[in-house]
Amino acid sequence: MAKRITAPDIRASKGQRKITMLTAYDYPFAKIVDEAGIDMILVGDSLGMAVLGYDDTIPVTMDEMVHHCSAVTRGASHALVVGDMPFLSYEAGPEQALASAGRLFKEGGVRAVKLEGGREVAPQTKALVQAGIPVVGHVGLTPQRVAGIGGFKVQGKTADAARIILEDAKALQEAGCFAIILEAVPAAMGRYITEALEIPTIGIGGGAHCDGQVLVIHDVLGLFERFTPKFVKKYANMAADVREAVTQYKNEVESGVFPDAEHSFSMDPDEEKKLS
Ligand code: KIV
Ligand code: NA
């Protein structure tokens, strides 16, 4: 396998090629995504909704993130694994951000972290980068602030709002981010920000002009059925496939079709006779 992708590799890809990113939360999916040649694997706090059954990402803890980051990093040998900093694990300031990112790095094995927010998290970003921890920014829709925003909705619909988000993105670039996620913004704004920044933009509902794209793997595979954002394209229908397989298993057990001889262990016939 080719050498492991680093944060500087991603940074240098801007204008050269499109960057690919998907989430993963466990070993088997990380391995598949890694072997497919995806550049970055995000252990997103979308974990809370996709895997842990929470209504939003707010309850996700550091312990949960560390647990899943370590499973993902065991499955990935080529992709750059990025650990998401959960809600209130960095907002208090650089010291808190360092402690949290340190756990994702040292216990979770990731080699970059992501945090949500604009200029207000620039001090945290700067402290992490100075400590040698590469940081991905995240502006536009920031789901950890869903209570304040009032729902998961498109951001930056006016030119004024787009300029404010660009100033935030520039502050993050200045603070040392090597890439920045643009979530749920109009495509025209994705282009405006992508052209104005020196670091790559990774869109999720940010339009075709972003330098790369990211999606939640449970959405891509059709595994998460509770709701589907407009920006999601389903490339498989795994929930239906799983439902069909499980139903077939149930029917075969109930009707005695499974297990058959092929899936059972045989005994020496002479020994078997002694049983009766
Ligand atoms: O948690 C997550 O999966 C994310 C992305 C979708 C960008 O933050
Ligand atoms: Na997230």
Image (cartoon, rainbow, N blue to C red):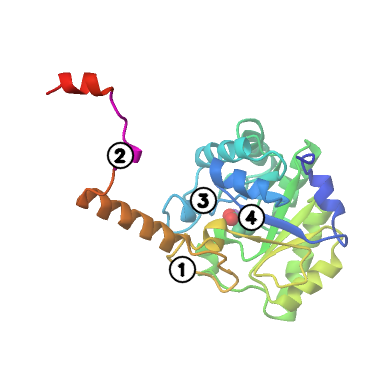
Q: Is residue 82 above or below residue 166?
A: above
Identify the image quadrant of residue 262.
top left
Give the residue number, with chain letter if any, for mark 1: 227
Does the rendering let one see residue 85? no
Q: What's under tag 1, amino acid-wise?
A: Phe
Q: CA distance from mark 4 to mark 2?
A: 41 Å
Give the residue number, with chain letter if any, for mark 4: 22
Q: CA distance from mark 3 to mark 4?
A: 12 Å
| Mark 3–mark 4 CB contact (< 8 Å) | no
Give the residue number, with chain letter if any, for mark 2: 261
SS type, badge 3: helix
Q: Which residues are magenta?
A: 260-267
229 in magenta: no
User: In the image, residue 4 lies at what x, y percent?
Assistant: 77, 40
Ligand 1: does it lie within 8 Å of the C-beta at label 3? yes
Q: CA distance from mark 1 to mark 4?
A: 18 Å
| Mark 4–mark 2 CB contact (< 8 Å) | no
Sequence order check, earlier mark of 3 and 4: 4
Which part of the image, by quadrant, shows the C terminus?
top left
**Which of pointers 3 and 4 indicates the residue nearer the eye?**
4
Q: What's under tag 2, amino acid-wise?
A: Ala
Q: What's under tag 4, amino acid-wise?
A: Leu
Q: Considering depth in this image, is 3 or 214 the residue closer to the camera?
A: 3
Q: For ligand 2, which image quadrant applies?
A: bottom right
Q: What's under tag 3, amino acid-wise?
A: Leu
Q: For label 1, count other residues whose C-alpha is less than 10 Å away and answer few (under 14), some (14-19) or many (20+).
A: few
Sequence order check, earlier mark of 1 and 2: 1
User: In the image, residue 264 lies at what x, y percent?
Assistant: 31, 35
**Which of pointers 2 and 3 indicates the residue nearer the eye?**
2
